[in-house]
Image (spheres, rainbow, N blue to C red):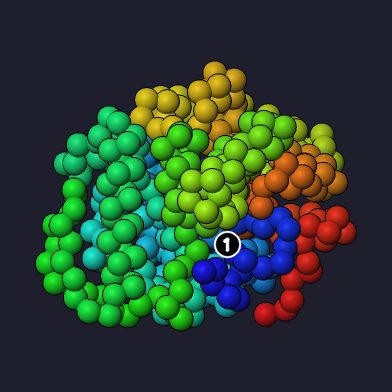
Amino acid sequence: MRRPGSSMFNANKLKLGIFSPNCSGGMAVTKVPERWDASWEHNRSLAVMADAAGIEFLLPIARWIGYGGATDFQNNTLETITWATGLLASTRRITVFATAHTAFTHPIVAAKQFATMDQIGGGRFGLNVVCGWNKPEYDMFGIPLPTEHTARYGFGQEWFDVVRKIWGSDAPFDWDGTYFHLKHVFGDPKPVGGVLPPTMNAGSSAEGRDFAARNADFLFTVLIDPEQGRNDVADIRRQAKTRYGRDIDVFTTSYVVCRPTAKEAQDYQAYYADKEADWPAVDRLMELQGLHAKSFPPEAFTLFRNRFAAGHGVYPLVGDPDQIADELEKISQAGFAGTTITFVNYVDELPFFCDEVLPRLEKKGLREKAKPI
């Protein structure tokens, strides 16, 4: 059952979310002085701004170790559960997701944390389930990273099953599974209204897509080009319906460089993502994701090194407001229900996007004008 009144299920044909503002650098692996400072003050200002603009959600990255380089990209990171709790208390209508590593958070603790957050936000909490891939982080926790994706997602499935069982049970229960052996398990409070919060999962691997098809409301997948994206969306939705009788929405991720003219946007991208790119951090990011993650298709690593510098490898939206709106329309026409957006500096750049791009999306029938808070 989809949660009534949630911004994630509103009438907008193309939904938008802010991605990775809890991490230093955001998604731009660059040395420019204006790169994102992920302080709490900046995150709170961004959240209030996005809430007023009618942006549907905020989505953090769960990161424990940075990628080195001159900037030590994403090393300074606000932990996602406490981050989301603070932002739920600071906003009015936007959905705030917590990104939870299943291997690093016990499901009994997680179930109570998430239900508490949902109470604080009045039903605006969202859950992003991550089954793990970053080996240096597993090493830091003293936990072996399973080499097989099936084992990672098997653990994640049982973890999520325990969380949902706690939320759906009015009496204590025992659990004797493959990964968890639990006695007299119980948890209160439950999520608001007894309805599961919006749930997402990201991945391009077969295992990741199957996990999302079985469990999630939203699957995030990397967009290489709109035509390939159209096929991916159709395949994902067909798999969810055929295997599990479920409807699932597909989202993608993108970075934005929007300026009054196309030349200004292109020049700025060349400046921050080429001339001032933190290339050692870019290469470390690509190495780790290529070795242990399947969030990106293999061709992304050989074709799009600059995309990783500009925005962590996600889809580029670079140009003037008309061009950005047209590209977002193509994403919608490919079947995506929405996309995340990132900027070199979120607080500095989001206002221009909201003032210039959102009205163009409204004229295209992709979004409704946000009501005042």
Question: Where is residue 66 drawn, in percent x and y?
Answer: 37, 39
Badge 1 local density, few (<14 within 10 Å), some, or many (20+)?
Answer: many
Q: Quadrant of the C terminus?
A: bottom right
What residue do we see at 54% from left, 46% from top? 242
User: Residue 356, how many percent across, how many down?
Assistant: 81, 56
* Residue drawn at point x = 40 percent, y = 75 percent: 191
Q: Residue at x 82, y 37 (%)?
A: 262
Is residue 311 at all visible to an observer of this figure? Answer: no
Where is residue 45? Give x, y as percent. 56, 66
Residue 98 sits in which quadrant? bottom left
Residue 278 in the figure: left or right of residue 85: right
Between residues 14 and 52, which one lies in front from this camera angle? 14
* Depicted 226 relative to depicted 342: above or below: above
Q: Above or below — where is 371 with respect to 45?
A: below
Q: State whether residue 267 appears in this view.
A: yes
Left/right placement of residue 68 relative to residue 49 reads: left
Residue at left 72%, top 63%? 12
